[in-house]
Amino acid sequence: MTAPTPTVTELNAARTAALIRKLTALADDEIILAHRDGEWTGHAPILEEDIALANIAQDELGHAGMYLELRRALDGSDPDRLAMFRSATEYTNTRFVELPRGDWAYTMLRQFMYDAYEALWLEAAQHSTYAPLAEVAAKAVREEKFHVQHTALWVERLALGTPESTRRTQTALADLWPHAAQLFQPVEGEDELVKAGIIPDIAGVRSRWEAVMVKHLQDKCGLRMSRDSFPGPARENHTEHLAPLLAEMQQVARQHPNAEVW
Amino acid sequence: MTQPQPDHPDTQHHDTQRHDTQPHDTQWPRWEVFKQDSEKRPYQAIGSVHAGDPDHALVTARNVFVRRPAAVSLWAVREADILMATPQELVGTPDVLAVSGTAGLYHVGIKKSHKRSMTFVDLVGAVQATGPGDALRQAHEQYPDALAWLVFPDAAKVATDPDPGTVESWFAPATEKTYKQQQYYGTIGRHVGELKRSGQMPGRVNEHPHVGEQPAVKHNEEPVK
């Protein structure tokens, strides 16, 4: 990469701590959503979609790995330890991604809303003044642009399909919308990172995201959208659904903490 | 992506022999998927997907077939729009060359080898034909030694966009994805060759028939009490 790398003084202690928080929050959303998607393996409506959703889940996990490698470069932490040995109180994912997978409409709609958010965030993060993040964003944004095509396609077909699929998609939107706001909550110290050009301004990402949601969900798919704004609880504040998810996800790693080969 | 094409009822009559006494297929239509590895390579048949419509067929094909392998373009063609035949079938049912349908440009694919491969049919060109049967006849004439011929109208195919954005998001990430080869997992425990070389490979159980600890022969001679 030829982008200018911030010097050590530009990433002072406060910014480093904030960047670690942000990278961890981004990674946590990816890990938990990937696990929810992975729960469909063997259960998706058709084999082809089973494979497709597993692909998407693996991509999201790959992005988590990239974020946590960026964190490792800052504080030496081990990505596998962070993923597999933190408890629910230590995870900083949004409730939006930890809620149970629901039906296919719920899963596809959540993934669409998330993919659109992630694609827009990554698109902006490609211009980060922190070169390692810009590089990761340029890589990951390509996959998100494909994900969002796939999930937008499904949401459209479900919303405009049968009366039952329309009803299920509308219900999923009513359930998910209030939780989506949490994706746009800044972490502590995020404004300093934005000022330094290290990460994109989340408010800008949010307004672009809302425009995409209105265009697709309301204008194209005919779904009714709430215009209410829900700030949501802090990222440390989880539902009762996260702990059982982690218990399953971390089970093997915790039973064999010394395993060297996976 | 290209818009769905109207049905080609005339080209489908080879698919209308389903007996109503049989259970109806509840699957979505099947689409044959053709993949192009690079601009210089032919499109090759790599398998099929079930999908509700053309755009769905393409995103599904991308997920199923090109997460890892190199590709720059995908085509999907509904099974009902494809006419194919082997040399044996041409002898047995020569009527296949009389299948009528829409006149126009038809793509021609041939199977060249019995060798096991991830692809079965290469698209080798296109012909102007009065219908699928005529296209198949021309394919047979041009490639008499092929092991199978396949034709479909150009209008029946749906293709991924050739724009850089699509290539970048659909196909480029595949070339950088790493994965573990199967033999990597041999390092869990110890490889069988290593055990053999160090003389630790356990002998075959029951090299002579046993009943429990007792050799079977002895068992026959002296019944176990």
Image: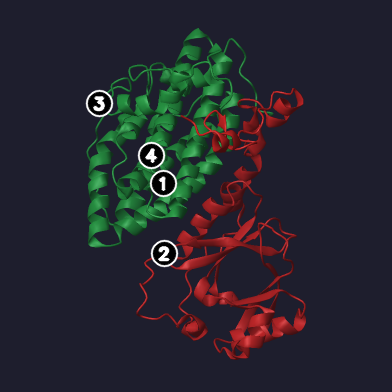
Query: Which one is nearer the viewer's eye here, A63 or B122?
Result: B122
Q: Amino acid at mark 3?
A: Glu
Q: Which residue is mark 1?
A: A42
Q: Quadrant of the N terminus of chain A?
A: top right
Residue beneath disc 2: B52
What residue sits right under mark 3 in the picture?
A240
Alpha-carbon neighbours of circle 2 within 10 Å: few (<14), some, or many (≥20)?
some
- Nearer the observer: mark 4 or 2; the answer is 4
Q: Is residue A105 above or below residue B158?
A: above
Q: Residues within 10 Å of mark 4 (few under 14, many from 20)?
A: some
Q: Which chain is green?
A: A
Local SS, label 3 = loop
Discs 3, 2 touching: Cβ within 8 Å: no
Q: The numbered mark 4 sits on a residue in which chain? A: A
Question: Does mark 1 fall on the same chain as mark 2?
Answer: no
Output the chain of dot 3.
Answer: A
Q: Is residue A107 left or right of residue B34?
A: left
Q: Nearer the viewer, residue A57 or A262?
A: A262
Query: Tags 4 and 1 in contact by the CB under 8 Å rule?
Result: no
